[in-house]
Every structure is written in C-alpha cells, then in structure tokens.
Image (cartoon, grey):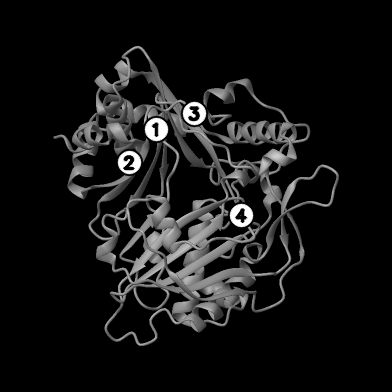
Amino acid sequence: MAIDSEAQVMESSIVTPSKATPRHQLWLSALDLLLVNRGHTPTVYFYRRAAAAGDFFDAARLKESLARALVAFYPLAGRLAVDDDADGRFVIDCNGEGALLVVARSDLTVGDLGDLTPSPELRKLFVPRVEPSSIMLAVQVTFLKCGAVAFGTALHHAAADAISAFHFFHAWSSLCRRGLTGDDDDIDAVVELPCHDRSLLRARSPPSVSPDAFAVFCPKLTLTQKISGPVASKVFTVSDGHVAALKRACGGGVRVSTFAALSAHVWRCVCAARGLPANATTRLTLPASVRRRMRPPVPGGYFGNAVIWVGTSGAVGDVTSEGLGDTAGRIRSAVRRMDDEVVQSAIDYFELAAAEVKKEDAGRPIPGDLPETELRIISWLGMPVYDADYGWGRPELMVRAESERSGFVYLMNDGGGGGVQVVVCVEAAILEQFEKLLYAK
C-alpha cells in the first residue's frame, strides 16, 4: 500500500481503570524479557458500519468499557519500567496510569487502501504513536470517509503474547457489547479472568539446562544485515478448498492440522523461490505455547508471554523433494517433543542469558533479517480474532499493520470464507515466484 495520507486526530485521552487496582511492580519472566525489545505489536481491525448504528463506535462507550476491562487486566494500565533493585530488571509498574485511546478521521475509504498489505504507511495511518513508549496499551479508532472504522491497536509485547492479547480484546469487546458493570463476577460471566502470577514461569533455582533441550527449542534469533535487495510484504489468501487439498496431499492416514500442512507448503515454496542450493541446511522455527506442556499446566487464563520457539531443519534438497506429509511430519515432531523439561530448560536458559545482557541494550530493537536459509512462521489460526464485537458487529478483516523483518510469515483465519491469510515478508525479488509456487496445483 502506497498512500501518502494522514489521519486527523480528533481526540486523545488516557483511560484509567474504573476501580482501584493493585499497585505494585509486576515481575516479568524470562519469556517476557525476551520480547521487551519487540515493542508494541501493531494490528488493525476493519468494521463496516451497520445502517442502523447511530452510535457507531461511540467514544464514550468505548472509554467506559475499556476502563472496566482495565480493572481485571490492570497491567495494561501500567508502564514498562526498571525495578528498584540493583539488578535493574524490567518490570511492569502497575500504577493505574491508564491506556491511550485516540479518535481520528480520515478522508480515505477502505477501497483506497488496496489489499491492506502490512506496511509502514498502514501503521502510520491507523495505529497510534505511543508516547511515551512505556505505555503498555494504545488504541486508535479512525472513522473512514466510507463510514467504516479502522480499529488500530498497539500492545507492548512484554505484557502479552498473542493468546493473552486476544483474551484482553475479547473481554473488552464483550463488556462494551453487553454493557456490563466491570465487576469481577460480571467479567467472569463473559470470559475467563486473567491470571497475573508470572512467577509460574520462574526459572528453577539454580537454573539447569538439559543439553537435550537444545535439539528442540531455539535459544537465539539469528539475524543478518546481508539480505540481497529490498524486503516486501504481501498477503495471500489460501482458500478452504486449497487447504483441504494440502491436508489430503499429506496422506499416510495421519490427521494433519491446517497449521502443519500449510506451514510445510509455505516452507517448501520459500526454499524453492529463493533458489537455495540443494545441499544447504534450511531451518524453520515456530512459536509453541507452553501453557499445556508444563507440569502442572499453567492456568488457561495466564496473562503474559508463555511461548518458546521450537524448530526443525533439513537439507534444502530433502525438504523440497520429499512428500508434503514428510515435511509436515517434521513440524509435528518439533512441537510434540516439547515437554515440561524442555520448557523448564528453555526458561532457565533465557534467565541465565538475560543476566548477561547489558541493561541499556535489553530494550533496544535489534536490526536485521533472518538469513535466507531460515523461515519463522507465526500462527494466529484458531484465535478469537473475529470475536472482537464491541456492539456494532464483528470485524470484516484483521491484519497485522506492519511486518518489517524478512523471513517472517503470519498465518491467520481470513474472517469469513474458511480460508487462511498468509502474510509473507521476504525479499521483494522472490514474491512473484513464491506466489506461483503457493498456488500451483
């Protein structure tokens, strides 16, 4: 999307919790600290105006319900800070200062926005600029000329992974839609209450890393400055019929998930489009939730980052020539090998690694792209993305506003047709060939 336009800010306010909330410094686990330098995750939801909706995305109603939601999700009303101890660990200062809510207008229509590819322009238009950057949550409601609304969000990754983020937006939208009072009992009637006990993911004492765990989890994000040519993002829609065909192609009588089948196909297509040497080693990494892998499992409502990265690798020639089911099997195996010991070893490893990072560098974004032999696929499949109904209908579309690092792929439901959106950020020169391979019969 190449649109030289800006939204006109009509109102900017800080929304505080509607009731007193706990005041303390929320300790962050090693899995949270890993993501401090990622900053705010930018997303945009698009809503079509209903003919009878005279109060369409009424700012007062949004503020009131947000204030109520922040009672249960009070860390999002806090600020990223450094603790008072000598070690200078990042924490969330749960001080109740509030979240940022911006109301804006734009002369653009949804049609003007084209295919809504993640881009700096899309982020600049619809995702609020977060100042100061210590604010944990910011939202911008932009009224478009055509009557639609772009609902942009920026939630700090130190506060929540995708599961927790969608948990919050589902709760907020439910409160807004139902007009509940925000008391705990009322919120509990709508969604599971969040669990803020991040000590559940505390490292062991002393930390102990099993050597075998390194074969499962990825200890480090490998970045390079040597990607050839410019990087570009594009959104591809894979129909439900195409997804079903990919799952059938895996064969072997084994039930294959949409994620495994589509990830295997995308991995093979990227390897081929890049023209990688057959004897080169290619690596695929993907996030896996630890919530059900730990013993005992952490509560389903755990609010924070509860994800580690697992991976699988192979020779390019093998990955691109073997059966699709074999490639999907590599992915299934990587996830299934993640058990309690692997999770605990990963947490212990990252706790030890965090102690070695200079505090002035810990929150600083790391530049670079993944090497051409690596791919990282992040799945939002099955998450309640399209349950965010604030009282004026469900979103027609949700997109990540920006994806700037080459080698990253996002999978998410398309919102209506049963297909999957594949958001790819790679070298611009290979996008055309990738598209041909992705849709090849």
Q: Would you say the residues marked 4 and 2 are in contact, meaning their CB atoms lie under 8 Å apart?
A: no
Residue 400 percent location from the top left of the image: 41, 53
Q: Would you say the residues marked 1 and 2 are in contact, meaning their CB atoms lie under 8 Å apart?
A: yes
Relative side of 160 to 435, left or right: right
Residue type at mark 4: give it.
Answer: Ala
- Counting residues from the start of the chain, the first of labels 1 and 3 encountered is 3
> Label for residue 159?
4
Q: The residue tagged with tag 4: helix, strand or loop?
A: loop
- Tag in front: 1 or 4: 4
Task: Give neighbour class at mark 3: few <14, some 14-19, many 20+ (Cα, 10 Å).
Answer: few
- Counting residues from the start of the chain, the first of labels 1 and 4 encountered is 4
Residue on which the image places disc 2: 257
Residue type at mark 2: give it.
Answer: Ser
Residue 95 percent location from the top left of the image: 73, 66
Measure the C-alpha gap from mark 3 to mark 4: 29 Å
In this figure, what is the number of numbered marks?
4
- Counting residues from the start of the chain, the first of labels 3 and 2 encountered is 3
Q: Would you place residue 413 above or below residue 192 in this image?
A: above
Q: Which is nearer the eye, 172 or 333? A: 172
Residue on which the image places disc 3: 225
Q: Would you place residue 425 above or below residue 375 in this image?
A: below
